[in-house]
Amino acid sequence: MSTYRKLQVAVVAIAACGVVVSAHPVWTQPEVATETKAGPSLADRLSWIESEFEQARIEQHAPGAALAIVKDGEVVFTQGFGVADIESGQKVTPDTRFAVGSTTKAFTATVIGMLVDDGVMSYDAHVREYVPAFHMMDADADEQIVVRDLLCHRVGYAVMNATWYGVPNVTSEEIIEIMGQAELLYPFRERWNYSNESFLVAGVAAGNAAGSDWDSLIAERIFAPLGMNDSNTTYAAAQADPLMAKGYLWDAEAEEWEHQPMRKLDAIGPAGSINSSVRDMARWVQFQLGRGEIDGTRLLSEETLAETWTKHSEMSGDIGYGLGWMLRESEGRRVIEHAGGIDGFTAEVALLPDDGIGMVMLTNQFASPLQNLSRSIVFQGMLGDITKSDIPVADEDLSRYTGSYIANFGPFKNTEIPVLVQDGALAVDVPGQMVFALKAPDDEGKRYFTITDTIAIRFNENDMGEVYSMTFFQSGATFECFREGFEAPVEIDLAEAQDYLGVYHLEEADLNVPVILQNNRVAIDMPGQMVYELYPPDDEGWMVFRVTDTIRVRFDRDETGKVVSITQQQDGNEMVLMRVAEGDEAADRLPNVEQLLAWARQAGVIDTAGAIESLTLEGTVRAVHMGLRGPTRAVYAKDRRVYSRLDLGGGRVTETWATPEQGLTRSFALGDTDLTSRMLAAAWVLGPLAWAGDWQEAFDSVAVVGRQPFDGREVFALRVTLDKNEATLLLDTETHLPVAVETITEAAYGQMLPLTVKLSDWREVSGVKFAHRAEIEIPMAGSIVSEWSTIEANLPVEDSRFVPPQKMGE
């Protein structure tokens, strides 16, 4: 890997990490006492856990939950909290059944381990030895793939949920056939990427190897000997179970619970279809902590169980993945765990194997924060100091920190992150995620999230004692968000800083890198990534990246004192970027909006006459990394009305109706979703008519913001805002044809989703050129390619075409 490539990979990884709560447990180690005295009893600790967990359940709006704890081989706690059914008021008990989601994966890996012990299977046997119908498009991977690859998410598959999620009557055989038509998203065995479908294949392999099926194997080899008599693996069994909880989603905006019908997962069963109670799951935890033995009976060899707890792939940071388990260390302790989540339900199973402690939490709330909180509470309660409080002292003036802070990193672009006071403590409301409560500040002023010890915030003050920003600390990176209405204090002589400004060229990558002033700081605007602000120079002239102290730069001068280059160091590597433009010359190298618009007119992509009122597109759509394809149709009207329909086969139909004010998407997977302002803006800017008119009239603001490489060519970057939402159009510097549109939209349940749409195959329609091929790149899921066989202008379109239909169930 080249030096530049190493730098680029590192910087991209930093920029992409964002604020994502990882699954590290949180607890405070007891301080070493200066004299011997009795600590809290087990009863005291369990009472503390019960109280803290119930408080967390109420605060996080979980209708019901159940918790079980195992210590030294014994089940020491099982209890239900809240209700299993809001309408009937049925209480949760230790015997209430919940969907356990992806915690099923460890069961699949374990039953395969049992067959390995029996000599019936081998982790390193080719998959087709057990599943003859299995094939891959990648010829090398197809020849090399073994069972072990399936169990640790390293095959390179994209997230392929569209093959099964919400698809009526789909079968396991159909999913495996579709997998054979999917291109790999990542090179084989080079990167971890979550794959439910890989576990499906592994489960089918186990069933075939044993002359049975996965459901029967789980029942006979795990449920029966462990005494998990109330557990099952099918939708029908769950629906017939009177003790099965109803699932819910908390609607924070409406402040009410929404019932989520149970999802049928039989076709993908080995990845997540088990339904169980905490009483039954406590037996599973005992078996795991017993290293494959329970009640004096060995069901799995200790060596094989250890193999499932051994890292086989790197997830991120210090988190690894074994065979069906996530692996890490926290507070010096080994943690083995896995979460589960499916419509209406969330689960967590976590082990501290070297301490003899394990827990399971099940709740009837989808995407519940209790998944992380429960583990933190249990581990703190069982091992930590439960006499100390991390809540800020009452006399601290919390109002001086509250307000909106503006984020520009990872998935956030000018995104407001509110800081508020909740239950007497500071909290951060991360858009698309949740409100995270903060602990009291430590000696460095860092306030850790109560839910995880891997993310902290520090509030920064100016010389007047005013809080002007907050800094996120996560995974070795730092991201600063400025408080609305405040700016950074000046830390460097701004007149002297002018010496550094300009454009620097990295020969190896043929990349021009601007150096600018941002927030009263010298900053490097890395094309295609983000703007990296620098700390003031040290005594040797080195300026460290604020986002990470692993990268630093020095501005080099010639004998006359003029800055001529940048030396950049990272991880022992060094590179030199030569200066090619000084100061305002960098801006002079960019066209203004009027110039770029004129060039676009000459290229034929602007409807100068204003004659096109609508476009109707017909063609095919292909989910490249999911193995799906089918017909697609779209209609765009000049007044920002949109209709689109794509059909990926087998009932996988998605339709969208949108106007500037409202919209609806009806999909096979999620049913009806009302479109937010951000979704409405994305529906328009990702379409062809958005860019075919005068940009200055079509958008709220327009600016040419850079010149950068993209897909082997140099492009101008035109940034626009529409209803406070940003998008960037990239135009080829030579042909002036648009090559891509970048924006951020919202996925289901509010998560921010960065999208890039690559445009090509430009052909004339009614005197204006339009792209006949559009490729959307979706993180983790790969590419969706639309190829339009026909694009016609001004066909008759009824107004009703753009009106959302009546919602399902209304």
Image (spheres, grey):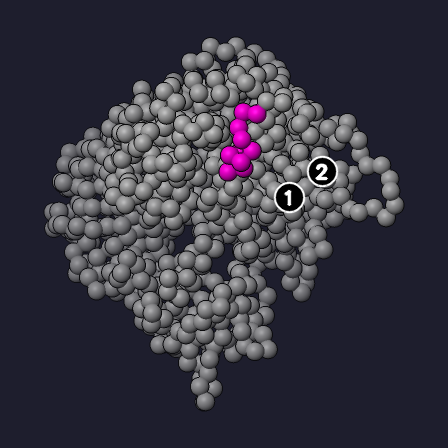
Along the viewing direction, whichever of 530 and 280 lies nearer the viewer? 280
x, y percent for residue 213: 38, 20
What residue is at 67 percent from the left and 37 percent from the top?
355
Of circles 1 and 2, the one toward us is 1
Query: Quick one: quadrant of the C terminus?
Result: top left
Vertical arrangement, residue 586 with respect to residue 119, above or below: below
Task: Report whether residue 28 is seen.
Answer: yes
Q: Earlier in the sequence, mark 1 or mark 2?
A: 1
Q: Are marks 1 and 2 in contact (CB under 8 Å)?
A: yes
Q: Is residue 606 left or right of residue 426?
A: left
User: For the residue marked with disc 1, what is the amino acid?
Assistant: Arg
Quadrant position of residue 68 = top right
Vertical arrangement, residue 384 with respect to residue 255, above or below: below
State which region is magenta: 298-307
x, y percent for residue 360: 59, 28
Task: Report whether residue 805 is seen.
Answer: no
x, y percent for residue 602: 17, 61
